């Protein structure tokens, strides 16, 4: 499915092209560097592929993805220490051994991973309805100054949302970066990956998923 340009943010293309062409110079925060050190150490010990669950909230999705990808190290990252702490308490011993929850600015981790030449096997962007106000375009993933790093991480990208326009904007940004993508409805019988999916499905919202393979290779379904 191709993106419908109607309804997209009027500054979207200019913003995306600017961020694709211009490095973001803000240094990573100290707490993000600390989290990255823990991630790097765990990845070195694991030795397998890396799956990233960006903005994971309490980590319910991270735990589910770790079971789905048992050979990978699955890392959930959220900026909220409260959410990460609540998730660790709730999951406890139920957190799979190949899962790791970290508190960090995930865009800092993207930059640090790219800097060290680390590439992802898969990248999940599951927070469903971020920053809906027009003035907050640059806080959406596709409008963020670190879109370059997000795409440079490579791997199979999967975005899910109940806000179709958000998915269409992300699809347009990928197209401007030369990356093919496919959009489809999330099946009603598919297990919800996040509390948001469970909530919105119960409220009758339609959920969509966008999949892409960074690096302009065929989309893996």
Image (cartoon, rainbow, N blue to C red):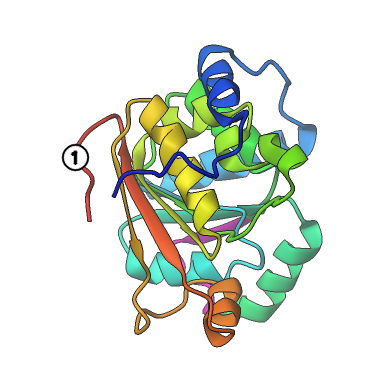
> Does the rendering let one see residue 120?
yes
Along the viewing direction, whichever of 96 and 131 lies nearer the viewer: 131
For image coordinates 46% across by 77% down, the residue present is 192
Rendering coords of residue 84 (x, y %): 71, 63
Q: Is residue 100 left or right of residue 66?
A: right
Residue 171: quadrant of the picture:
top left
Residue bounds of the magenta highlight: 94-101
As rendered, which of 86 and 199 lies closer to the eye? Answer: 199
Q: Label 1 belongs to which residue?
A: 218
The percent position of residue 212, horizontal first and vertical second, equals: 32, 44
Is 95 magenta? The answer is yes
- Does 126 sit left or right of 87 as displayed? left
Q: In the current view of this chain or complex, which residue is farthest to the front?
A: 6
Residue name at image x 59 percent, y 14 percent: 23
- Residue at the left extreme, as displayed: 218
Relative to 78, is 215 above or below? above
């Amino acid at each position: 499915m191709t993106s419908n340009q109607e309804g997209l943010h009027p500054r979207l293309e200019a913003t995306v092209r600017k961020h694709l062409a211009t490095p973001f110079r803000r240094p990573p925060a100290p707490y993000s560097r600390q989290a990255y050190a823990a991630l790097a150490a765990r990845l070195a010990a694991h030795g397998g592929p890396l799956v990233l669950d960006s903005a994971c909230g309490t980590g319910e999705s991270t735990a589910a993805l770790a079971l789905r990808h048992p050979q990978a190290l699955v890392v959930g990252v959220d900026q909220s220490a409260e959410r990460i702490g609540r998730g660790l308490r709730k999951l406890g011993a139920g957190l799979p051994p190949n899962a790791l929850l970290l508190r960090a600015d995930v865009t800092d981790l993207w930059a640090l991973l790219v800097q060290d030449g680390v590439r992802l096997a898969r990248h999940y962007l599951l927070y469903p309805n971020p920053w809906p106000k027009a003035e907050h375009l640059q806080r959406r993933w596709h409008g963020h100054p670190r879109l370059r790093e997000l795409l440079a991480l490579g791997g199979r990208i999967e975005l899910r949302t109940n806000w179709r326009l958000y998915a269409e904007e992300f699809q347009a940004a990928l197209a401007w970066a030369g990356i093919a993508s496919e959009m489809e409805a999330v099946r009603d019988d598919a297990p919800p990956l996040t509390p948001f999916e469970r909530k919105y499905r119960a409220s009758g919202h339609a959920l969509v998923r966008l999949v892409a393979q960074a690096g302009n290779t065929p989309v893996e379904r």
